[in-house]
Image (spheres, helix red, strand yellow):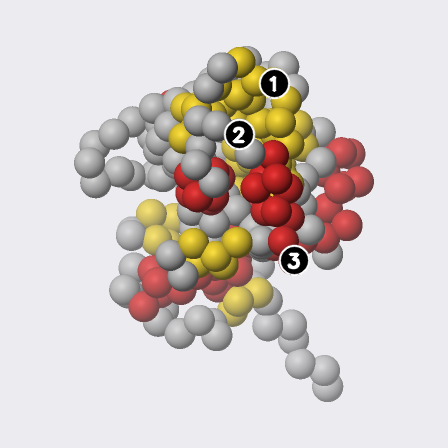
Amino acid sequence: MAEAPRGERIAKWLARAGVASRRDAEKLLAEGRIRLNNAPVAHPATFVSGGDLVMVDGKLVDAPDRTRLWRYHKPVGLVTTHRDPQGRPTVFGKLPSGLPRVISIGRLDLNSEGLLLLTNDGALARKLELPVTGWIRRYRARVHGRVDERRLAALTHGVTIDGVAYGTIEAGLDSLRGDNAWLTISLREGHNREVRRVLAHVGLAVTRLIRIAYGPFQLGTLPRGAVDEVPARVLRDQLPRIE
């Protein structure tokens, strides 16, 4: 007699439910904050099946919905986190009402703006953040300093700064006026503050940074602070490319 299906590992189930990334869900497990059918869960090899009840911090978690994705035009002055120890305003505190619980795909720092992808599926978020997807993150950067196009071109070979190795970066000059210029920057990895650090390495201070694309998704004319859901058909067309 065949064994009944075991369901889905609880960390993955929680990630798909939008509670946290799979890695953070495993931390919640280790901290004893998760219960399955009213019993505490500590081991990540615990499985959730249809009809099971899962609680986090005493609150019932709804079963994962279908995967959804939104484009958000992040303004300057918001941190990309659910809670900020310094009490600064957060992206998630400024989202329009009516959205389910969502998490970001990657981050934009406090002083950066532009396209931030949001999803209700933590497993998808983790997958789309990985360089192996091959998705390009594209930015426009306003910089101050003397632009040396040869040094910009050399960034295609990667660069190591303070022991951190950055992969191929394409940087092109769009316009120049005195000591100020606009550049277009394309990269695949997205280390913390990568654009700012790499441009500082070539003698340029970033005075404005706007993400205009993440993979096939574009900022376009989305107004600052607005959220727009990606149609399910478009999502189906794009996601098989990274399976």
The percent coordinates of residue 132 (x first, y second) are 65, 58
Residue 147, which numbered label?
Answer: 2
**Label 1, label 2: how many angstroms apart (C-alpha)?**
11 Å
Mark 3 vs mark 1, foreground winner is: 1
Q: CA distance from mark 2 to mark 3?
A: 31 Å
Q: Residues within 10 Å of mark 2 (few under 14, many from 20)?
A: many
Left or right, 225 with respect to 115, comes to left
Neighbour tally class for label 1: few under 14, some 14-19, many 20 plus, Cα within 10 Å: few
* Res. 112 image quadrant: top left
Q: What amino acid type is highlighted by mark number 1?
A: Ser
Label whose residue precedes the other's in the sequence (1 or 2):
2
Residue 175: mark = 1
Does the residue at mark 2 contact the one at mark 3 (Cβ under 8 Å)?
no
Q: In the rendered structure, which disc, 2 or 3, sits on the residue that comes first in sequence?
A: 3
Where, quadrant-wise, is the C terminus in this rendering? Answer: bottom right
- Secondary structure beneath disc 2? loop
The quadrant of the rendering that contains the N terminus is bottom right
Q: Secondary structure at mark 3?
A: helix
Q: Depth check: 55 or 97 in front?
A: 97
**Residue at 57% in and 65% down:** 8
Residue at mark 3: 132
Judged by depth in the image, the label closer to the viewer, 1 or 2, is 2
As drawn, 86 above or below 243? above
Mark 3 neighbour density, 10 Å: few (under 14) some (14–19) many (20 or more): few
Please state which amino acid type lies under the numbered disc 2: Val
